[in-house]
C-alpha cells in the first residue's frame, strides 16, 4: 500500500501554493507538480472542483471528502483555520491512523480507491441482495428510495440572523457510530403491504390542533410496538407543521427530490410537531446482527472516531444511485431523529438552526451567541468548534443533560434512545473536550496527545491514558439532579392522552 499524505492549498478552487505533510512537520509547495506520485495525497479541493479541473485523472490525488468528512470541516472543527501548515501536519497524522484502523478491518488499498473510502466500505458491508429484493416492485423501490434522506435542511423562506456565520457542532462520532451499528436492520425480503381500517390514518399535532383520533392513536401505537421486529415504510401527506419547527424541521427539506414516503420512526417523530395523513405502507422483518462489524473501541481517539463514523455510514449508504438500501433508510432516519432533538434544544434557546444530519448540527451564530451555543452543545454532548472556546465554562451550564433526548413516548423505546444517551455520556473524547471548555482552552493539544496513544502497544496505551484522564478530568462537573435541569427540548404543547 502506498503512503498517505495531506496537501492543503491556499486557494482550493485554483490550487497553487500551500503546504503538504506525510505526518511530519509540513513543508511549503508551489503547486500540484511538487507532490510525489509515490504518495496518495488527500487535498482540500472540493469534489466538484476536483472533477471540474481534471484532478480525478491523477491517480495520486484525492478530493477533500476522501475520508467522508470534508477536510475544510475538520479544519474548522479543530480550530486551525488560520494555519495551513499546522492543519496539514495534524490531518496527515489523523488520516494515517484512521486508515490504519480501516485497513485492519477491511480489504482495500488506497491507491485502488479513488472516490472515497466510505463507498468502498459500503461495497464490502452492504449485500447486493438488500436492494435487489425491491427491484421487481416499482412502488416499493420508490418507497425505499424516497425514505432515504441524509441531511435536514432549513426552509427556503427562513431568514438567517444578520451578521451570523455558520458553525458545526459535532456529535461524539464513536458513540453515535456504535449506537447506529447496534440497530436491528431490515431483512428486505417477504415484504407485505400495510393498510388501515379507516382508509387514511390521520396522526400528529401542530399549532394547537390535534390530528389524532382514538382509533388512529391506537393503530399508530400498534405499529410502533410492532416496529421492534418490523421495518415499516409509510406513504404520507404532511398537512401542517408547527410554526416553531417549520424553519428547520419541515419534512423533506434538504433532500434533492420531493418525498412522500418515510420510515415509521420518522413519521412518529414528525407527529410530535406535524399533522400527517398516512395512506398505506410496506413492511418486512428486522434482523439483529444483520451485518458483521469490527469492534469500535478507543472512544478517546479522534482518528478512531473518524474510522468508526465511516464504518457506520458504510452501513447507512447506498451501493449506488440505482440501488436504494432499506438499511440506509432506517439508519439515516434514526440519526436525524436524534440530531433533530439536539436541534430543538438549540432552537429553544433562540439559536438559529441551519441544518442537521450526518453527525452534526449546523448553527448560524453571531459572535455574541458563541458562549450560549457552547453551553447548549455541552449539555447535549456535542463538541463545539475549538476556536469558539475563549472563556472558562460554567459547570452548571455545560453539564450533560440526558433529558434533552427524551420525548416520553413509544418511539424512545422503539429506537432504544437510552442506549444512545448512555454511549454519549460515557464517551471519553467528549469528556476531555468538556474539561477544556471548563478551562476555557482549545481541546486540540489534549486531543493530539490522546490520538497518539493509538501508536503505542495496548498496555502502554492504557497506562498513559489513565495518566491523561487523571490530570485533565479532575475538574469535570458533577451532573446536577434531574429536577434542577432545564427541559429545553420539551414542547410546551405536549399533550397526555
Image: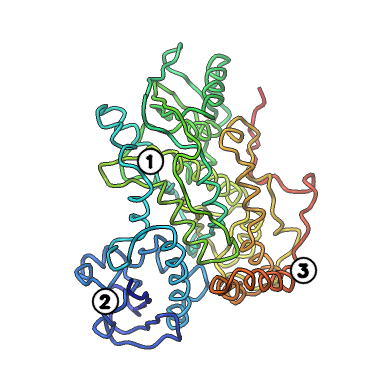
* Quadrant in which the N terminus is drawn: bottom left
Q: Is residue 290 left or right of residue 373?
A: left
Which numbered disc flags the more N-terminal residue, 1 or 3? 1
SS for dot 1: loop
348 or 261, nearer to the observer: 261
Residue closest to the far top: 197
382 or 230, nearer to the observer: 230
Q: Residues within 10 Å of mark 2 (few under 14, many from 20)?
A: few
Task: Give the residue at mark 3.
Answer: 474
Q: Is residue 491 left or right of residue 101?
A: right
* 345 to 445, vertically: above or below: above
Which numbered disc flags the more N-terminal residue, 3 or 2? 2
At a point 66% along the width and 22% down the height, the residue shown is 497
Say which mark, if any, is on residue 148: 1
SS for dot 2: loop
SS for dot 3: loop
Distance from Cα at disc 1 to Cα at disc 3:
43 Å
From the top left corner, tell me how far across and down residue 82 is, in percent: 47, 79
At a point 41% along the width and 29% down the height, the residue shown is 233
From the top left corner, tell me how far across and down residue 235 is, in percent: 38, 27
Say which mark, if any, is on residue 266: none
Q: Is residue 476 left or right of residue 182?
A: right
* 423 to 455, vertically: above or below: above
Q: Are marks 3 and 2 in contact (CB under 8 Å)?
A: no
Q: Residues within 10 Å of mark 1 (few under 14, many from 20)?
A: many
* 198 to 365, vertically: above or below: above
Q: Are marks 2 and 1 in contact (CB under 8 Å)?
A: no
Mark nearer the viewer, 2 or 1 = 1
399 or 292, nearer to the observer: 292
Mark nearer the viewer, 1 or 3 = 3
From the top left corner, tell me how far across and down residue 311 is, in percent: 44, 54
Task: Give the residue at mark 2.
Answer: 14
Amino acid at each position: 500500500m502506498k503512503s498517505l499524505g495531506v496537501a492543503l492549498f491556499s486557494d482550493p478552487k485554483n490550487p497553487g501554493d500551500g503546504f503538504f505533510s506525510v505526518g511530519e512537520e509540513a513543508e511549503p509547495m508551489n503547486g500540484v507538480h511538487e507532490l510525489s506520485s509515490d504518495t496518495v495525497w488527500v487535498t482540500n479541493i472540493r469534489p466538484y472542483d476536483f472533477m471540474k479541473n481534471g484532478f480525478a485523472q491523477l491517480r495520486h490525488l484525492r478530493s477533500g471528502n476522501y475520508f467522508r468528512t470534508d477536510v475544510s470541516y475538520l479544519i474548522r472543527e479543530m480550530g486551525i483555520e488560520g494555519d495551513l501548515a499546522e492543519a496539514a501536519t495534524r490531518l496527515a497524522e489523523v488520516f494515517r491512523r484512521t486508515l490504519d484502523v480501516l485497513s485492519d478491518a477491511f480489504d482495500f488499498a488506497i491507491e485502488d480507491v479513488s472516490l472515497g473510502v466510505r463507498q468502498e466500505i459500503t461495497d464490502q458491508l452492504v449485500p447486493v441482495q438488500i436492494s435487489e429484493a425491491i427491484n421487481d416492485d416499482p412502488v416499493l423501490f420508490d418507497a425505499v428510495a424516497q425514505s432515504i434522506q441524509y441531511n435536514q435542511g432549513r426552509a427556503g423562506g427562513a431568514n438567517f440572523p444578520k451578521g451570523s456565520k455558520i458553525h458545526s457542532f459535532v456529535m461524539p462520532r464513536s458513540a453515535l457510530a456504535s449506537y447506529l451499528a447496534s440497530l436491528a436492520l431490515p431483512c428486505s425480503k417477504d415484504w407485505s403491504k400495510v393498510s388501515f381500517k379507516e382508509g387514511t390514518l390521520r396522526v400528529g399535532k401542530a399549532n394547537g390542533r390535534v390530528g389524532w383520533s382514538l382509533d388512529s392513536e391506537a393503530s399508530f401505537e400498534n405499529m410502533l410496538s410492532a416496529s421492534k421486529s418490523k421495518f415499516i415504510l409509510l406513504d404520507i401527506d404532511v398537512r401542517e407543521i408547527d410554526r416553531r419547527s417549520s424553519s428547520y424541521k419541515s419534512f423533506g427539506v434538504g433532500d434533492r427530490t420531493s418525498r412522500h414516503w418515510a420510515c415509521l420512526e420518522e413519521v412518529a417523530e414528525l407527529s410530535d410537531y406535524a399533522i400527517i395523513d398516512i395512506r398505506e405502507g410496506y413492511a418486512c422483518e428486522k434482523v439483529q446482527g444483520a451485518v458483521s462489524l469490527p469492534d469500535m473501541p478507543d472512544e478517546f481517539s479522534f482518528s478512531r472516531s473518524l474510522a468508526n463514523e465511516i464504518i457506520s455510514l458504510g452501513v447507512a449508504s447506498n451501493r449506488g444511485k440505482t440501488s436504494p438500501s432499506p438499511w440506509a433508510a432506517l439508519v439515516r432516519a434514526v440519526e436525524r431523529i436524534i440530531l433533530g432533538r439536539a436541534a430543538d434544544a438549540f432552537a429553544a434557546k433562540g439559536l438559529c438552526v441551519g441544518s442537521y444530519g450526518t453527525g452534526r448540527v449546523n448553527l448560524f451564530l453571531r459572535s455574541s451567541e458563541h458562549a450560549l451555543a457552547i453551553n447548549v452543545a455541552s449539555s447535549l454532548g456535542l463538541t463545539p468548534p475549538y476556536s469558539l472556546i475563549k472563556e472558562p465554562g460554567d459547570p452548571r451550564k455545560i453539564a450533560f443533560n440526558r433529558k434533552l433526548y427524551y420525548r416520553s413516548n413509544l418511539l424512545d423505546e422503539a429506537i432504544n434512545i437510552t442506549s444512545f444517551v448512555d454511549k454519549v455520556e460515557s464517551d471519553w473524547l467528549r469528556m476531555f473536550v468538556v474539561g477544556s471548555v471548563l478551562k476555557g482552552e482549545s481541546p486540540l493539544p489534549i486531543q493530539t496527545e490522546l490520538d497518539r496513544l493509538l501508536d503505542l502497544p495496548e498496555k502502554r496505551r492504557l497506562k498513559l491514558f489513565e495518566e491523561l484522564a487523571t490530570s485533565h478530568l479532575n475538574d469535570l462537573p458533577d451532573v446536577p439532579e434531574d429536577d434542577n435541569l432545564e427541559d429545553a427540548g420539551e414542547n410546551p404543547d405536549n399533550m397526555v392522552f
